[in-house]
Image (cartoon, helix red, strand yellow):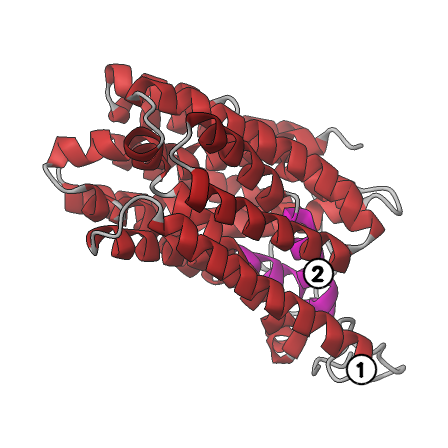
């Protein structure tokens, strides 16, 4: 595989660390500013909303430039946002800094997916995309637990300062390793026309609903593990290693499965995820079950990451760049929705089992949407792949 994938993975590591470390440091950040845990959840929600805004906006603004320069520019913005996060003097400014930090997230992963597919040998596009995403999952093995432990011991501000340093390292890696890739583009209007296709929207709906369940639980995993399963606060960072190991293993297997069958990979992953959340809801008070569930929902969730991105790019046809970025926005709409719904049931006093119940319902709904999308494709009512263009005519974009 091309060495350029390593640079993409380093960027994914930085982004994965900052996205998920907040969940382990939520109690510390809440204590710093004297707010409740559900209120502190806005730190997570703001980041997710920043991704939603930034992914399509920055991709549209940057579509004329080479992927290499776009990736470097996005990581510069990411790094500046983390400097602001580490220095934020008030809760409101912290929330704003997290939103700014997130603006480049979706556009970075969207561009990475397109570059990885472009550089991959024939028949190995799924594996290449999985390798590019590996930094995100490895962050949950190394970056998140170490960042959580560092933040608990020396203060959460230091954690975000270190992430800013990783951002600088990423900029150097991108400059040295990524070729000046200019993938074919049909122009902004053609990119946007991909959103007229039903399968593009169905894929985004699978992403939003299916992945929101993961974040309904993961956003509040620290208090779930301490208050429900009985673990000490110091154990949380190391239990998150299990999530990272599961996510990394699931992602690498998912890349191979996506090269085999995208629809089957999605259906299997959503089935497994629903079952894991159901078991966690019933037996999550047992420490061993809780630890196993943390591994399992990481594995099941990230086993689908390459498949869902591949499905989106195939459905988009010539509009791959915008749709790939929009997929990241959809993923983080699910993130924000999950954090909101988890906070809602906790604020209602329904206990720390309630996020898992909500999560199981969400992933089951995502499974139903995936099954519907597959049926519409097979029946010809809404084909996944755009019809090939005739000579001298634009490609079909309706589905």
In the image, taking residue 83 as reference, residue 264 lies left or right, namely: right
Q: Main secondary structure of the magenta part?
A: helix
Query: Is 372 placed above or below 278 here?
Result: below
**How many numbered discs sit on the rendered protein?**
2
Q: Quadrant of residue 201?
A: bottom right
User: Magenta span has 284?
Assistant: no
In front: label 2 or label 1: 1
| Residue 105 versus residue 308 in the image, above or below | above
Q: Which residues are magenta?
A: 304-330
Residue under numbered circle 1: 380
Which residue was labeled with disc 2? 311
Quarter of the picture holding the N terminus? top right
**What residue appears at the point 55 percent right and 61 percent down from the top-left corner?**
364
* Image height of 141 relative to 212, above or below: above
Q: Position of residue 326 (x, y in %)?
A: 54, 62
Residue drawn where x is 40% and y is 60% of the image: 53
- Graded by Cα atoms within 10 Å as few (under 14), some (14 to 19) or many (20 or more), the crowding at tag 1 reads few
């Amino acid at each position: 595989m091309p060495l350029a994938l390593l640079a993409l993975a380093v960027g994914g590591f930085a982004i994965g660390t900052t996205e998920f470390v907040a969940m382990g440091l939520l109690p510390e950040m809440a204590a710093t500013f004297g707010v409740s845990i559900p209120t502190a959840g806005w730190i997570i929600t703001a980041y997710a909303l920043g991704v939603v805004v930034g992914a399509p906006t920055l991709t549209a603004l940057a579509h004329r430039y080479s992927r290499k320069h776009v990736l470097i520019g996005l990581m510069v913005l990411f790094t500046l946002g983390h400097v602001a996060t580490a220095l934020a003097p008030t809760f409101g400014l912290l929330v704003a800094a997290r939103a700014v930090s997130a603006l480049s997230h979706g556009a970075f992963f969207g561009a990475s997916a397109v570059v990885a597919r472009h550089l991959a040998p024939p028949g190995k596009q799924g594996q290449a995309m999985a390798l590019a995403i590996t930094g995100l999952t490895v962050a949950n093995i190394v970056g998140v637990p170490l960042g959580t432990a560092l933040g608990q011991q020396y203060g959460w501000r230091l954690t975000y300062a270190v992430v800013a340093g990783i951002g600088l390292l990423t900029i150097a890696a991108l400059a040295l390793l990524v070729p000046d890739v200019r993938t074919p583009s049909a122009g902004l209007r053609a990119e946007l026309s991909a959103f007229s296709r039903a399968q593009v929207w169905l894929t985004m709906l699978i992403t939003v609903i299916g992945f929101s369940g993961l974040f309904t639980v993961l956003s509040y995993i620290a208090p779930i593990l301490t208050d429900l399963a009985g673990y000490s606060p110091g154990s949380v960072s190391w239990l998150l290693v299990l999530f990272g190991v599961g996510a990394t293993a699931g992602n690498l297997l998912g890349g191979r499965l996506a090269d085999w069958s995208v629809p089957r990979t999605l259906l299997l992953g959503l089935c497994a995820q629903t079952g894991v959340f159901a078991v966690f809801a019933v037996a999550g008070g047992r420490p061993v079950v809780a630890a196993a569930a943390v591994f399992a929902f990481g594995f099941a969730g990230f086993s689908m990451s390459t498949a869902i991105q591949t499905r989106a790019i195939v459905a988009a046809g010539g509009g791959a760049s915008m749709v790939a970025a929009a997929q990241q926005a959809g993923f983080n709409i699910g993130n924000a929705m999950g954090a909101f719904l988890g906070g809602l049931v906790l604020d209602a006093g329904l206990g720390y089992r309630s996020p898992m119940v909500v999560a199981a319902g969400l992933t089951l709904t995502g499974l139903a949407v995936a099954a519907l999308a597959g049926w519409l494709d097979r029946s010809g009512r809404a084909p996944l792949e755009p019809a090939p263009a005739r000579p001298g005519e634009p490609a079909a974009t309706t589905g």
